[in-house]
Image (tube, grey):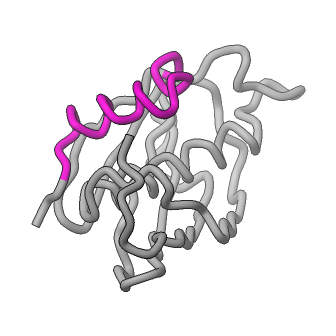
Amino acid sequence: MTAMTAPEIFALMHKVFPTVKAMNFEIEQLDDDTITLSRHTTDQDLRPGHTISGPAMMTMVDTAAYFLILSRIGPEALAVTTNLNINFLRKPVPGKLTARGELLKLGKRLVIVEVSLYTEASDKRVAHATVTYSIPPHTSSQP
């Protein structure tokens, strides 16, 4: 029961979070309960040791969760992250970073999403996260 398509999500992001456009996210797959989001990392995403930084990976996780949630609840710009727990599992090499997210719970006020991160260099996860979002009371917060 999709409320927003990938093009609609990007249109909303360009209105309310214009910096998202510069990050060149690509929604590879989106359905009711899952998302696959990818982007190619740049030198700005790297930390010493030539590895993808934690903040870059957390941004990817949070964005995948947000996009998946919007696809279900519609253009609710005021949905906010209340918790993000991430485990860094192995050193991610620069290149294409892919987030695979799964909706675990969609409640009236809280949404929980599980996200795994991968690089194109390996089929092993480089990070695993759970994200909780708070959905504001049903008021019109659409832009």
Quarter occupied by the C terminus: top left
Q: Position of residue 69 (x, y in %)?
A: 36, 61
Q: Nearer the viewer, residue 46 or 135?
A: 135
Query: Furthest-right residue in view?
Result: 48
Residue drawn at (35%, 72%) of the image: 103
Asked which quadrant contains residue 56, the reply is top right
Image position of 117 (left or right of 3): right
Above or below for 25 versus 118: above
Q: Nearer the viewer, residue 17 or 61?
A: 17
Q: Nearer the viewer, residue 14 or 67?
A: 14
Above or below for 75 versus 80: above
Q: Main secondary structure of the magenta part?
A: helix
Q: Magenta stretch: residue 11 in it?
A: yes
Asked which quadrant contains residue 2, the reply is bottom left
Q: Position of residue 33 (x, y in %)?
A: 24, 68
Residue drawn at (72%, 44%) of the image: 91
Quarter occupied by the N terminus: bottom left
Residue drawn at (45%, 57%) of the image: 65
The magenta stretch is 4-23
